[in-house]
Amino acid sequence: MKQYLQLCQRIIDEGIWVNNARTGTRCLTVINADLEYNVAANQFPLLTTRKSFYKAAIAELLGYLRGYDSAAQFRAIGCNTWNANANENAAWLTNSHRKGEDDLGRVYGVQGRGWQKPDGTKLDQLQKLVTNLSQGIDDRGEILTFYNPGEFELGCLRPCMHTHTFSLLGDTLYLTSYQRSCDVPLGLNFNQVQCFVLLALIAQITGHKAGKVYHKIVNAHIYENQLALMKQQLEREPYSSPKLHINPNIKTLADVESWVSTDDFTLEGYQSHPAIKYPFSV
């Protein structure tokens, strides 16, 4: 919580105004931010200075892990964050590769579960690392990446949180996550939740203890139309972090792919200030 608030204050104090060509809205920007989340101690990084809806973030993560390519698929599991990018993104609406309403193209989980190889076959990155980690193997390349420059034109959006590297030390699993761009008021708490849950979930299904997440953000920004609301949020006193409980019956990747839902993730001790409705820039 303190890390988040410190980053927001740093952007306000030190940020440089940048004109964003994609959205047409300028933003206050800093380069390089490093955050850590202690999964071992179950310090769940959910914002308390405004009400945060963590289940939507977990639903989105589940969609990534399943390789979803449609906003309708995400909506079906409780996540509406892809509706605008699928159906209101002007550049994507005129892209000849778009297949129709709700189509996202080859984004995020599509790359993670079906990276296109030169010989026409597909590589399932997630299955490879789960198999290795389940056998106690860390080849220093247990990486899940959604960033495929050769196929940017085949999707509605380049991935922001683009690469996750798992590291196994003894019986403890760690995660280092890389993010090229971050809408801090709206997106960061989603990203924090997803990093935390990703490590906790992969540790659980591969039979390891969860350690820490190391989250590196390259470009962290606050859009101009979010700034006044962020200053209001920074005046609020944070509450203690809640704890996350994951259904212990989730034991395999097949479970994650088939029956797991947001109901399998519950919170203990979450207290927050009222919600703040930040504007979203498409």
Image (cartoon, rainbow, N blue to C red):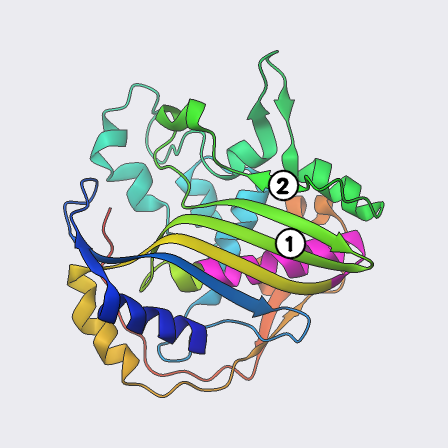
Left or right: residue 200 versus residue 282 is: right
Q: Which mark identifies residue 197?
A: none
145 or 47, which lies in front? Answer: 145
Left or right: residue 239 versus residue 101 is: right
Q: Nearer the viewer, mark 1 or mark 2?
A: 2
Q: Amino acid at mark 2?
A: Ile
Q: Which mark identifies residue 143?
A: 2
Q: Which residue is disc 1 drawn over?
A: 260
Dot 1 or dot 2: first in sequence order is: 2
Residue drawn where x is 23% and y is 69% of the image: 12
Residue 164 can be seen, yes or no: yes
Q: Which region of the structure is painted magenta?
A: 191-209
Q: Amino acid at mark 1?
A: Val
Q: Between marks 1 and 2, how big is the CA–CA gap?
A: 23 Å
48 or 31, which lies in front? Answer: 31
Q: Residues within 10 Å of mark 1 (few under 14, many from 20)?
A: some
Left or right: residue 106 versus residue 42 is: left
Residue drawn where x is 23% and y is 62% of the image: 15
Residue 77 can be seen, yes or no: no
Location of residue 8 by image quarter: bottom left
Whether residues under marks 1 and 2 lie with C-beta atoms below 8 angstroms apart, the answer is no
Location of residue 43 by image quarter: bottom right
Residue drawn where x is 28% and y is 78% of the image: 233
Percent coordinates x, y for residue 116 in the rendering: 56, 21
Q: Residues within 10 Å of mark 2 (few under 14, many from 20)?
A: many
- The local secondary structure at tag 2 comes to strand
105 or 183, which lies in front? Answer: 183
- The local secondary structure at tag 1 comes to loop
